[in-house]
Image (cartoon, grey):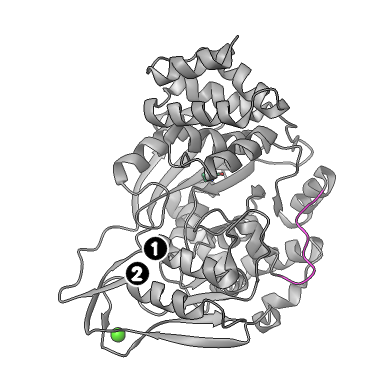
Amino acid sequence: MLMQEIILKKRNGQVLATEEINFFVSGYTSGAIPDYQASALLMAIWFSQMDERETADLTRAITDSGEIIDLSAIEGVKIDKHSTGGVADTTTLITAPLVAACGGQVAKISGRGLGHTGGTVDKLESIPGLNMALTMNDFVRVVSDCGVAIVSQSPNLVPADKRLYALRDVTGTVDNVALISSSIMSKKLASGADAIVLDVKYGSGAFMQSLEEARKLAAMMAAIGERAGKPTTVLITDMNQPLGRAVGNALEVEEAIRVLRGETGGDLLTVALALAAEMLVAARLAEDLNEAEARLQAALDAGGGLRRLQCMIELLGGDPRIGDDPSLLPRAAETVPIRAAATGYVSCIDTAGIGHAAQLLGAGRATKDDAIDPAVGLKMQVRLGDSVEEGEELGRLFINRRENFERAADMVRECVAVADQPPPMSPLIHDRIRSGGG
Ligand code: URA
Ligand code: CA
């Protein structure tokens, strides 16, 4: 088989055979196929798309490039949750322990921040002492003891995704249905869970900017789950503004803890509860979404979610007292307010831009080898539709170095449009899609 023929075929809009997809994935993983040929094929896929069968084959080939975790030692339905990437989105840190508090077994492999979006691994690693690089035996033990384990991807898990992702990140080929679906679903299939709940984000802070593309992505991932025999539920949720208020690693952990302590809520809690309810139903721990939501609310009120999170933090080597006293998290040296330049209503928020501003302060990486500062970031004060007066605080930067902070403040100000009229409000949860069409 010749790689250049596979590239030509896809460039010309043809459907690739299973063997051709396997040849590409195994050859690229082993190093036999160079980056320039892989880049060309990725770009051809970006333009020509892949159908469901091709995407399922790509997913399977990526899954099989490394080890597949065996969670059979854990009793009950093991359930996993994943988001396509957003800003101020700590739903994992809220849903996973709440589901555990309701009897669920949550076994989750998380990623690092990507572009303007945050990653759960970076967030949790802002907790002093915490280490997410567990052996598989330890992963199983934490799930068994706490009902929830969130760990980072080991080098042995989906190595093909790791290589392809890094290449996509620098070749303009991230935002494609087949490529995102196969990247996410390969990790889900390799991580051994029985049922999968996905959060597909759409809007100014998501990789999928249009609702139509988000629906295609959701349908594709549900279809791949179905083909793999893993019941998959997808919610399409709004990312036209930061979901929570905090953007930055320790700041986001603090916000998630405050949600679990019942001190704050808002859209972040609404989406977290909706995802958690789907997880309970998928795990057959609740008959329907109403029962699931009632049980989750009771767990939240009783502090059960917080205790599960603290259990996991302790077993991962972190300081569980941050759950009682979030001020033990790393703190930035200085805060700087960002003020509105005009009076009116917040009509639009460039959410990716907000993510980039936090990244610029050191909360995310500009290149893959950059170190991040766990303490820095920003907090948004306003949400879409809020009325603001000139000079009112839109948000606040949390900084450790004065470098770049003025640019970051300008970026945030430019990301928040103020107009005479409030914008039309779109629903927070747009749609729900289940594998098998249920
Ligand atoms: N998250 C992933 O893991 N992969 C993608 O392609 C996009 C988001
Ligand atoms: Ca106001």
Which is the main secondary structure of the residues drawn in magenta? Answer: loop
Mark 1 vs mark 2: in front: 2
Q: Name the residue under label 2.
A: 415
Going by the numbered disc 2, the residue's amino acid type is Cys
Residue 250 falls in which quadrant of the image? bottom right
**Residue at image mark 1:** 351
Give the camera-side residue of 432 and 252.
252
**In what element is the residue under mark 1?**
helix
Residue drawn at x 58%, y 88% as measured from the top left: 334
Residue nearest the viewer, comparing 55 with 99: 55
93 falls in the magenta region:
no
* Stretch in magenta: 127-134
Q: In this view, does 361 lie above or below 281?
A: below
Q: Earlier in the sequence, mark 1 or mark 2?
A: 1
Residue that appears at 61% across and 58% down: 120
Is label 2 in a helix, a strand or a loop? helix
Labels 1 & 2 near each other (Cβ < 8 A): yes
- Counting other residues with Cα less than 10 Å from the Cα at mark 1, is it few (<14), some (14-19), or many (20 or more)? many
Looking at the image, which residue sits at the far bottom? 391
x then y, percent, for residue 280: 55, 49
Residue 52 falls in image quadrant: top left
Q: Position of residue 231 (x, y in %)?
A: 53, 34
Q: How crowded is mark 2: few (under 14 residues within 10 Å), some or many (20 or more)?
A: some
Q: What residue type is labelled 1?
A: Thr
